[in-house]
Image (cartoon, rainbow, N blue to C red):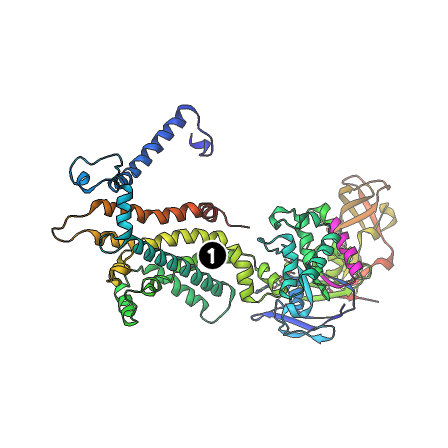
Amino acid sequence: MAGQGGMVQKRGSGLWLTHLGLIVGVAFIFFPIWLAFVASTVDQQAIVRPPMPLLPGDKLIENYTRALTSGVNAPVATMLFNSAVMALGISLGKIAISLLSAFAIVYFRFPGRTLFFWLIFLTLMLPVEVRIVPTYEVIANFGMLNSYSGLILPLIASATATFLFRQFFMTVPDELAEAARVDGAGPMRFFFDILLPMSRTNIAALFVILFIYGWNQYLWPLLITTDPEMNTIVMGIKQMFPSGDDTADWPVIMATSILAMVPPVLVVIGMQKLFVRGLVESEK
Amino acid sequence: MATVALENLRKSYGKTEVIHGVDIDIADGEFIVIVGPSGCGKSTLLRMVAGLETVTSGEVRINDRAVNDVEPMDRDIAMVFQNYALYPHMSVFDNMAYGLKIAKVPTDEIKKRVDTAAEILQLEPYLTRRPRELSGGQRQRVAMGRAIVRKPAVFLFDEPLSNLDAKLRVQMRLEIKSLQRDLGVTSLYVTHDQVEAMTLADRMIVMNAGVADQIGKPLDVYSDPATEFVAGFIGSPPTNFLQAKRLGRHIEDGAKIGIRPEHIRLVPQTETDLAGTVVYSEPLGAETLVHLKLLDGQDATVRQDGALPIPAEGETCGLSWEPASEMVFGKGGSRIRS
Ligand SMILES: Nc1ncnc2c1ncn2[C@@H]1O[C@H](COP(=O)(O)OP(=O)(O)OP(=O)(O)O)[C@@H](O)[C@H]1O
Ligand SMILES: [Mg+2]
């Protein structure tokens, strides 16, 4: 078997067994999500009284409307919007900045070029959590608490993306830049007309990853948004858990959870074709 | 149309000088081929003319204007790269039109020029395709088209045919030649292939380790090489070099006699005092190459008419040639003329 490699089509019972394994795996992973979905379609009593229902109830529209318009602390629609702004801001900002810095590092000779590259590279080792206290200090002094810029800016510099684009730019033949130069394209023109379109699949792949990264930010929004109107959805879910003796409004919390999953899923599905292409092939 | 002049052109990378002073005046419409072995500085020389490489010292003049500090786009040149360097995400049309768009040529004029170029190069059916959907030969044509549409004063080619198979190379060679004739654009063409150099060039520059060993018409270079390097590099099979001393000549220490394979005749051993044993023969039909080991251990190749009898391996033959076809080279490789 080992010698035949994975590309050989399996037939007969082997095929069925493989699929059975996969289906069980999918069901296993999917089950909690299903439970959450079911919980978001029934009323409070059905959840708190065991056993948990396994089939959707009839409160779907009611629960979701309630979540979107009023929520617990803030309407989920507001939180979704905040999350979307933050995730888009972070992913687009990161892509823009890292494209430009990779462009500078690969195509321009300036003093300290390698130094800057390694400095950027070093920050790979410093995730948000490590620098969170000084970053908070800075943002607070700038008066950016409870603002979109406060949510987005500290997360926007990206060594990973810079590194990725640098690697990609280095595979672009020098002659292409020279041909553009002979054609009369200045550096920025070359960047926009040639490098950018050529990086399209990489950008798409990165966008998906960064969007999810931005969407799932928890600690940072938790720290700097005290105003419920600025809550993002991922942290908002946690905020919905009551403190003290109040009872949790589980159907609304579950509806919120399901809603929180939708945008990343849509982004992945929407960008799937470009995304997969970007991961497996670099365009010639 | 344009003249190009290089004056004592030098290039150093750091402390190493790779071009040691090249001088040439190129007439309007002339086709100049720069030929030489790998690493001798052909591309560097061409790229200095293009403006892609800075000039360390000396001067490049296009139409009597010094262009050392002029950007490539303002030098009125067009360049064809070895790997074509087509923009992968643009259609064939856009590839050719890109330079014109930047130069803000009106759209209908762009269309007209690209269509004309496409017609000349038989690219009309492919104008909407991407480069990766083209064959090597077609990509090569697109690269040519991109150069043509700009109507430059000078064409620069850096080994444009070396990625093509042998047959296509011959065909494209002819096309480039006739195209250049028709357009009458001054051209510099880099190659390491001496056949390309011989067939394309009005004049050729034979480069050797950063020095232009000889500049001249192909046939003049062939028949009258200025250095041992040129004599050995141009012509296939290469010139035979025999130690003058062992032939009983006393010219100067280390001097060599160069003699082209086609100038040597095989004669019965009795008729001459230079003889060798046949190592092997290559009958090519029209001609036969006979490789011999001379009795004193030197190698020699003889090229003779295919109709002549082919000597057997191990046979000993005499070698003879007209004194006029001898070329004498001194120890440093330069030609000694009597
Ligand atoms: N950027 C560079 N830095 C240092 N040395 C270089 C650089 N570019 C070229 N060289 C050297 O300059 C010399 C000439 O290079 P060049 O590319 O002109 O050779 P070439 O004649 O075009 O060879 P080929 O036929 O292989 O293309 C070589 O010895 C090369 O090592
Ligand atoms: Mg070269």
Q: Is residue B38 visible?
A: no
Horizontal and vertical percent for residue A107?
52, 64
Image point (47%, 72%), residue name:
A111
Is residue B6 placed above or below B317 in the rendered structure?
below
Q: Is residue B316 visible?
A: yes
Horizontal and vertical percent for residue A266?
39, 47
Give the residue type at disc 1.
Gln
* Residue B171 forms part of the magenta stretch: yes
Give the quadrant of the N terminus of chain B. bottom right
Q: Which residue is mark 1?
A: A167
* Image quadrant where residue B54 sits: bottom right
The response on whether ligand 1 sits within 8 Å of label 1 is: no
Q: Is residue B278 left or right of residue A100?
A: right
Q: Is residue A134 left or right of residue A191?
A: left
* Image quadrant where residue B66 sits: bottom right
Q: Which residues are magenta?
A: B170-188
- Closer to the camera in the image, A61 or A95: A61
Is residue B22 placed above or below A78 in the rendered structure?
below
Horizontal and vertical percent for residue B98?
63, 60
Horizontal and vertical percent for residue B117?
72, 56
* Residue B29 forms part of the magenta stretch: no
Chain letter, disc 1 residue: A
Q: Considering the numbered disc 1 on the image, is that residue within a helix, a strand or a loop? A: helix
